[in-house]
Image (cartoon, helix red, strand yellow):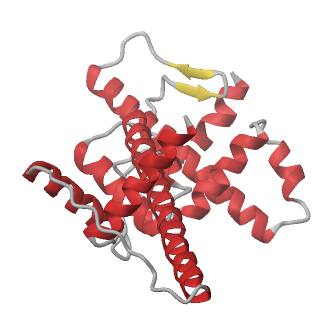
Amino acid sequence: MAQSQAIAPAISTLPTGKSQSQGGGTMAAHRGGLRLPRAMAAHRGGLELPQRLPFEKWLSIGMQLSAINTSSAWCLGDWLVYGIEAFSGRYRSAVEQTALDYQTLRNYVWVAKSFPLSRRRLELSFGHHAEVAALSEPEQDFWLRKAEELGWSVKQLRQEVRASLRERKVVETDRNETDRSRQHFEGSQEDERHWAEENGVEPEMLKLNIRINRRQFETWKAAAAKAGLDMEEWAAIALTNAACDTLER
């Protein structure tokens, strides 16, 4: 077991404990290490356990291994970021010795750069942070706070974020369509004024009286407010769009 004896000390120094956050953040350097009974050995191929191991010690080892697994992605990301900045000439050859997929390592770097130590949330996994790394800092903090408060898994966080982004896309599309319709409506009014001026007549503006119930009125009013238009202007645009859609069928 020469290999086991050589690797076990290195594993015993890996971080496992928790500490208070620094500078108002949510994650800081860990303390302590994996403590193995003498009859145990940890090496690259796995963990050798004695035949008789008290439940409390077995549970303690599992908790420590879980903490190591959670922090390993962060540690690799920070290690890679340091290597990029300090050893740019020798960085790539050193990374090849890790036997990890290049794209995986790139993701580690991206997430580690997106979240300095002071902004990492200890109660959430690396995967939680990776799910929101592409968002702005305020959005990252918002979603991670919700995930922590509600106990979301990585999958639940992913679903919530994607649903929010889809809804935002729909709202932006509706807003863009309203803007285009408004520009078309205003352009039509401008054409009407030019024609009237060229022909020496007053521009003709027709009025349309519509009978609607209270529920329709409130719905139209809310839609106009959401579009940033007064109700008459919104109604003219909505009716014009409906007419165009009907004629194009």
Q: Which quadrant of the rendered structure holds the N terminus?
A: top right
Asked where in the image residue 178 lies, by quadrant, the reply is bottom left
Observer-nearest residue: 70 or 185? Answer: 185
Residue 162 drawn at (x, y percent): 45, 43
Quadrant the C terminus occupies: top right
Q: Is residue 165 visible?
A: no
Q: How many marks?
A: 0
- Residue found farthest to the front: 200
Decide if residue 111 is on the left or right side of residue 228: right
Vertical position of residue 157 compared to residue 241: above or below? above
Q: Which residue is rendered at x = 50% and y = 24% of the image?
A: 40
Residue drawn 16% across and 50% down? Answer: 216
Residue 113 drawn above or below residue 166: below
The answer to whether residue 36 shows anywhere in this view is: yes
Question: Please, which residue is most extreme toward the left here?
Answer: 214
Left or right of 6? Residue 194 is left
Tell me residue 111's x, y (percent).
Answer: 58, 55
Looking at the image, the residue that sits furthest to the top is 51
Q: Nearer the viewer, residue 121 or 3?
A: 121
Q: Is residue 43 left or right of residue 203?
A: right
- Nearer to us in this view, 29 or 151: 151
Q: Position of residue 168 (x, y in %)?
A: 43, 53
Q: Residue at x 55, y 89 (%)?
A: 200
Residue 133 against residue 37 in the figure, above or below: below
**Residue at 91% across / 65% down in the picture?**
89
Task: Give x and y (percent) for residue 164.
Answer: 39, 48
Residue 103 vs residue 53, the one in the foreground: 103
